Image: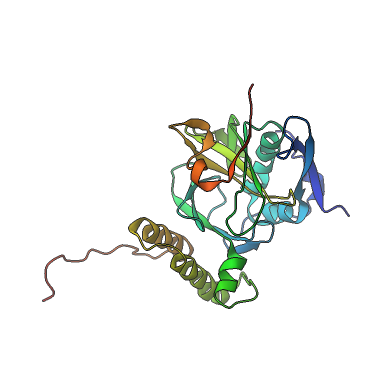
Amino acid sequence: MRDGYRVQAISPVNPETEHVDVVIPLDLARRWYKASSVDFDNLEIAKEVLENPLRIFEGVRDYEEGGFCYVGKPKSVYVRPKCTAPLPHDCVFTVYVNRNMRLYEIRTEAADKDEDPLSPKGWKERYGGLRWRSTS
Amino acid sequence: MAKHFLADEMTGERGFKAEPWYNKYGDCVVFKSEDVGVVAERIDDILTLYYSIEGRRPVGFQLKGVKHLMQRHGCNTVAVTGAATENEIKISLLLMIAYDAGPRNIQRRLGYANAHEVVYPSQKPAISVDAAPVS
C-alpha cells in the first residue's frame, strides 16, 4: 500500500530547472479526514499552491534542519466542511514541508502588508531565507 | 463540487474530534476546538494560535519543536492521547514548558493564556480585580 500522494512541485533546491515530489502522507490525510475534515478539504488548496506557488522559503524550523514553506494566494479556502469562502484579502495560504519533502501543515496566515503582500507576515525573522519567487 | 483528489484513499466517515494530537511529520502538537478554516497567528518560535477565518474566534493552537521541548525537560517520549485525564496534565505541562522556554512578556503571556482557554474553556474566563489597596 502506498504511503503518500505525490504532487509535482518546483524544487526548492534548484527552482529554475527541477521539480520534486512533495508527498502528502496518507496517514496524515486520513487523520484529517476523520478528525479535522476542513483540513482535509483544504488539501485541495494545498495541492493548488504546491503546483503554482508564488514564494518558497527555506529554514522554517528552529530545532530541525531543512524544511520549506510554499506560499500561494488562492481565490478561496475552505472555512467549514465542504464550504469555501474568499481568501481574506490580507492573507496568504501556506504549505509547510519537512526536510523529507513530506507535507505536515497547511493554513491561512496574515500577509506581510508592508514589504511583500505575497509573503507571510514576519517572514524575514521566521525563515532562513527566500528560496524562490514567481516572476509571473 | 469536484471529487477530492484523495477521496478514493479514504474509508469510513468524515468527522471532527476536538482533541490534541501529535503530528509526527511536523513534530508539533495541534489542537482545534472547531472544524473550521483557520488563520494562524504566530506568538513565538513555539506557539501559534489559530483563529477562525469567519469571525476570528480563537479555536486552537499549534506547539512546535515538541520533541526538543520534552527532551529539554527530561522526557524521552511524546504521548498525547484523547483521554481527558491524560490531556489535562500533558497539554497544560507542554504549554508551561513552552512558555518557560522564552522571554517573559505580556504578549507571550496573553498568547499562552489564550491557548490554555481554548483547551479548557471556562464559563467565566475573565474576572474584574479591584485596583484599590487590599482591605
Q: Nearer the viewer, residue B33 or B135?
A: B135
Residue B39 coordinates in the image, percent (x, y): 51, 44
Residue B113, image quadrant: bottom left
Q: Is residue B13 visible?
A: no
Q: Nearer the viewer, residue B82 or B104?
A: B104
Residue B79 coordinates in the image, percent (x, y): 63, 72
Q: Residue at x 64, y 27 (%)?
A: A134
Residue B127, image quadrant: bottom left
Q: Residue at x 43, y 32 (%)?
A: A114
Q: Nearer the viewer, residue B51 or A98?
A: A98
Can you say which quadrant of the picture contains the N terminus of chain A? bottom right
Q: Is residue A115 left or right of residue A52?
A: left
Residue A43 coordinates in the image, percent (x, y): 68, 43
Residue positioned most to the right? A1
Residue A82, image quadrant: top right
A86 w.r.t. B102: above or below: above
Q: Residue at x 43, y 61 (%)?
A: B112
B13 w.r.t. A54: above or below: below
Q: Is residue A43 left or right of residue B68?
A: right
Can you say which quadrant of the picture contains the C terminus of chain A? top right
Q: Is residue A75 left or right of residue A13?
A: left
Residue positioned most to the top? A136
